[in-house]
Amino acid sequence: MADTASAGYGPGMGYGPGYGMMLMERLHSYVGKNVTVYVGEEAAPIRGMLHNVGTNYLEVHRVVDGVQEAVLIPMQAVLAVSVPAAPPRP
């Protein structure tokens, strides 16, 4: 795994006041919306409703064979998140 500090993702390396929001903060506005999260080296898609966003995980609820399940995804496993084009209005 690459050193995160050299990639510009460490503390003081682009996050903080004036640098925009982190992924976690941006995803909070999409809670309750359908999303697709691409996970792992294979970019396996997980589709469902974004239920919760923590500092180090995403919780996606999906229905498989008529049974609702919660999928907890560690942030470091997330490759990409496909979300609706416009964030929901408060």
Image (cartoon, grey):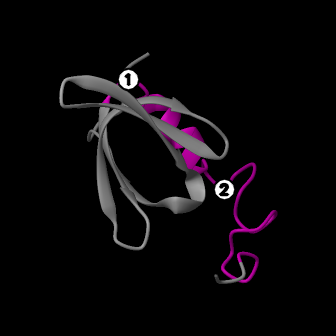
Left or right? Give the position of 28 relative to 8: left
Left or right? Give the position of 29 relative to 38: right
What's the amino acid at mark 2?
Answer: Tyr
Left or right? Give the position of 36 relative to 41: left
Pick whichever, 70 or 80, lies toward us: 70
Which residue carries the number 1 mark?
32
Q: Looking at the picture, does residue 73 appear above or below residue 79?
A: above
Q: Residue 39 in the image: x percent, y percent?
A: 41, 60
Q: Earlier in the sequence, mark 2 or mark 1?
A: 2
The span from disc 2 to disc 1 (Cα, nearest Å) is 26 Å
Q: Looking at the picture, does residue 11 appear above or below residue 69?
A: below
Q: Residue at x 34, y 71 (%)?
A: 42
Q: Find out whether residue 86 is within the magenta segment.
A: no
Q: What segment carries the magenta color?
A: 4-33
Q: Residue at x 70, y 64 (%)?
A: 14
Pick whichever, 10 or 63, lies toward us: 63
Q: Quadrant of the C terminus?
A: top left
Q: Secondary structure at mark 2?
A: loop
Q: Residue 65 in the image: x percent, y percent?
A: 18, 31
Q: Neighbour class for label 2 at 10 Å: few (<14), some, many (≥20)?
A: few
Q: Quadrant of the N terminus?
A: bottom right
Q: Which mark is residue 19?
A: 2
The extreme right residue here reads: 12
The extreme top residue here reads: 90
Q: Find out whether residue 26 is within the magenta segment.
A: yes
The secondary structure that dominates the magenta segment is loop
